Image (cartoon, rainbow, N blue to C red):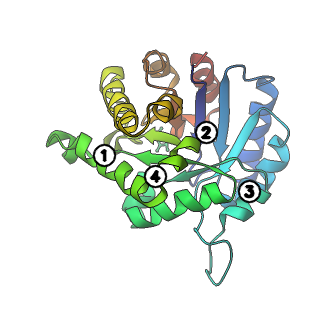
């Protein structure tokens, strides 16, 4: 039985005061997460403060971005070992905003996936199709290509320690959520794809859904057999909403 994982991607939001306050509220409200794991992703500049609040708590924290070299002349970047040193457990890799707005290639994404694992971090690999790709029935092809590229670069064993997030681009920040059936169909497709390579890993990997998850739709998504949690954007900035989504995960 896979544990549920609820991840809050705070994106480029908040001030030091607001993210600290949010972290304190979450900490006070979550004494134990039971069978659900929780992780939040503040901006890089807020990570240190959030780590001081959440360290040794049941709420994990992670980084939204990094560069896949350990150190060197890479002005403006931070590395996976630096993130790990702060106590992070997870990093996001391949988010559609990084693919689309910052031109991240499949090649860079695969390098980041590997660098994260080498540093002792668990990558949350995001995949998903655009509206046009869905409308032209390319969803499965796109997801398969995104996964296959990483697999070819990192090898199957690396999928043992990762999380996959299915985030349809058309559902991100739009208020349009994939229906539970639509999301389940893609999650099952991903699990079948994994099981063609290794059944045990396919059954083990948590597959999260992301895209306008709110407390009102979380329960019906989590009821689906292959949806193992959520990667939440906007609603994760509101303590009450985020906690309600966590509660819906059981
Ligand atoms: P929203 O929940 O705001 O749609 O964002 C989803 C997302 O991109 C999480 O990574």
Does ligand 1 reach within 8 Å of label 4's beta carbon? yes
| Coordinates of residue 107 in the picture (x, y in percent) | 41, 66
Marks 3 and 4 sit apart, C-alpha to C-alpha, by 20 Å
Q: CA distance from mark 1 to mark 3?
A: 30 Å
Which residue lies most toward the left here? 136
Q: Which is nearer the N-term, disc 1 or disc 2? A: 1
**Residue pointed to by mark 2:** 237
CB atoms at circles 1 and 3 under 8 Å apart? no
Q: Nearer the viewer, mark 3 or mark 4?
A: 3
SS for tag 2?
helix
At label 2, counting other C-alpha atoms closer than 10 Å, the crowd grade (few under 14, some 14-19, many 20 or more) is many
Q: Which mark is residue 95?
A: 4
> Where is residue 203 shown, x and y percent of the image?
49, 28
Vertical side of 77 occupied by 182: above or below: above
Foreground disc of the pair 1, 3: 1
Disc 4 is placed on an element classified as loop
């Amino acid at each position: 039985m896979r544990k549920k994982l609820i991840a809050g991607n705070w994106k480029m939001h908040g001030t030091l005061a607001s993210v600290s306050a949010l972290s304190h509220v979450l900490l006070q409200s979550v004494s134990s997460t039971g069978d659900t794991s929780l992780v939040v992703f503040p901006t890089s500049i807020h990570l240190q403060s959030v780590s001081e609040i959440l360290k040794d708590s049941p709420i994990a924290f992670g980084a939204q971005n990094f560069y896949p070299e350990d150190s060197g002349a890479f002005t403006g970047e931070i590395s996976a070992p630096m993130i790990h040193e702060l106590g992070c457990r997870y990093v996001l890799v391949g988010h559609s905003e990084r693919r689309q707005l910052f031109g991240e290639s499949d090649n860079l994404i695969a390098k980041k996936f590997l660098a994260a694992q080498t540093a002792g971090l668990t990558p949350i690999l995001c995949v998903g199709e655009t509206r046009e790709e869905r409308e032209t029935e390319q969803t499965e092809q796109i997801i398969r290509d995104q996964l296959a590229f990483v697999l070819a670069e990192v090898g199957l064993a690396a999928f043992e320690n990762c999380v996959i997030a299915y985030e349809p681009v058309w559902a991100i920040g739009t208020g349009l959520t994939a229906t539970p059936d639509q999301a389940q169909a893609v999650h099952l497709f991903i699990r079948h794809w994994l099981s063609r390579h290794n059944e045990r890993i396919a059954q083990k990997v948590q597959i999260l859904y992301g895209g306008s998850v709110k407390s009102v739709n979380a329960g019906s998504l989590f009821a689906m057999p292959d949806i193992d949690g959520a990667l939440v954007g906007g609603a994760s900035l509101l303590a009450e909403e985020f906690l309600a989504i966590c509660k819906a995960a059981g």
